[in-house]
Amino acid sequence: MWFVTGLIVIWFLIYFNLERLAVVIYNITGLSSVKDGYARSIEFFIYEVPKVLLLLTIIVFVMGIIRTYFSPEKTRALLEKKSLFLGNILASVLGIFTPFCSCSAVPLFIGFVEAGIPLGVTLSFLIAAPMINEVAVILLFGLFGWKTAVIYVSTGLVIAIISGYIIGKLRLERYVEPWVYEIKSNRKGTGEDKINLQDRIDSGYTAVKDIVGKVWIYIIIGVGVGSFAHGYVPEDFMAGIMGKSNWWAVPLSVLIGIPLYSNAAGIIPIVQVLLEKGASLGTALAFMMAVIGLSLPEAIILKKVLKLPMIFIFFGIVGVGIILTGYIFNLIY
C-alpha cells in the first residue's frame, strides 16, 4: 500500500508540473527561440505524449481494481431475464465499466446468447463497451474538459440503447449463425473466490502492464499525426472540410472513420487537432465514434457469428445514430 501510495504521489507531482517540465525541455533544445512548423510540432509532441500516457496509466490502474468486482459471469447474470428496454439501458451502462473490446466480441456474443440474453440487449453491450470505455472518457476529460466528456458518454449511451432496442424489436435472430444457438451451455455458477485488497491492486498493476503495454504505440502514432497537423496545417483549414456549414461533413466523416481502426488512446489526440484547426465538435465526435465503434476489423470478427445482412443492419442503425448525434451537436455548439 505504501508503495502504491508513493507511486500515486509521484504521478500527481509529474502530471501537474508537466507544463513546467516541457518548458525546461524547450529551453534546453533551443525550440523556444524557433517559431516554425517543425518547432510547433515538436512542442506539441513533447507535451502531449507524457500527458496522455500519464492519464491512461492512472485510469487503467483504477479501472483494473474496479473490474475485479465484475466478470463476464456477473455481467450475464445481471442482464438475464430483464425486459428489452431496461436490458438495453443496463447493458449499455455495464459496457462502460467492463474491459471488453471488439477483439473479445465473439466469445462475449456467444456467452450472452447462450445465457438467453436477447439479441438487442447483447448488441447494446457490444456497442457501448468499445465506444464508451474509461480510456475515452478520461482522455476526453483531460484534453477537452468535463463538458465534452459528458457529451460523449451521454450520446454514446443513447446510441447504444436505442440501436440495441431497435434491433431487438426487429427480431433479427434469423441472421445469427445457427451454430451459436446449438452450443450447449456448460457455465458454472457465478460464485467466485473472495478477492482481497492486495489481489485487486495486483489486478490494477496487471491491467496497466497489459493495456498500456499494448496501446502506447497507438498513442505515439496518434500524437505524432496530431503534432504534424498542429505544426503544418493552417489555422481554420479543417473548417472548410469538417465545419458546420457543410451538411455533408458529418456523414463523410463517419464513412471515412469506418475503414480506419484505432482505439480511443490513438484517435483522441487527432480529434484534438481537428478541433483546433476548425472542425466542428459534432463532426469530430462523429468521426471518433465511427473509428472506435464501427471499425472494419470488428465487422470481420463479428462475421463469425452474424450473417452479412445482420452486420449491415447493425452498422447501418449505429451509423445513422452517430450521424444524427453529429448534426445535433453541430446545431447546439
Image: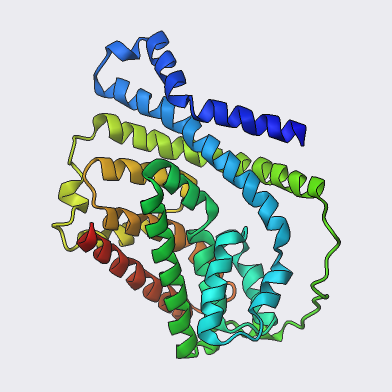
Task: Say how many tags the image has.
Answer: 0
* Residue for point 58% across, 84% down: 118
* Residue for point 37% across, 23% down: 42
Quadrant where the N terminus lies? top right
- Res. 259 visible in picture: no
Question: In x, y percent, where is residue 168?
Answer: 49, 85
- Res. 63 visible in picture: yes
Residue 224, located in which quarter of the rendered image?
top left
Q: Nearer the viewer, residue 24 or 16?
A: 16
Q: Nearer the viewer, residue 144 or 102?
A: 144
Quadrant where the C terminus lies? bottom left
* Residue for point 28% across, 45% down: 275
Compared to 256, does 211 lie above or below? above
Question: Left or right: where does residue 154 sit relative to residue 3?
Answer: left
| Residue lying at the far right of the rendered structure | 193
Question: In x, y percent, where is residue 289?
Answer: 40, 59
Compared to 312, does 40 lie above or below? above
Question: In x, y percent, where is residue 158?
Answer: 41, 71
Question: Left or right: where does residue 265 sit relative to residue 198?
Answer: left
Question: In x, y percent, where is residue 108?
Answer: 64, 69
Q: Nearer the viewer, residue 108 or 178?
A: 108
* Residue for point 62% across, 27% down: 10
What scheme was used to colour the molecule? rainbow
Compared to 108, does 238 lie above or below? above
Question: Left or right: where does residue 171 sit relative to residue 112?
Answer: left
Residue 150, located in which quarter of the rendered image?
bottom left
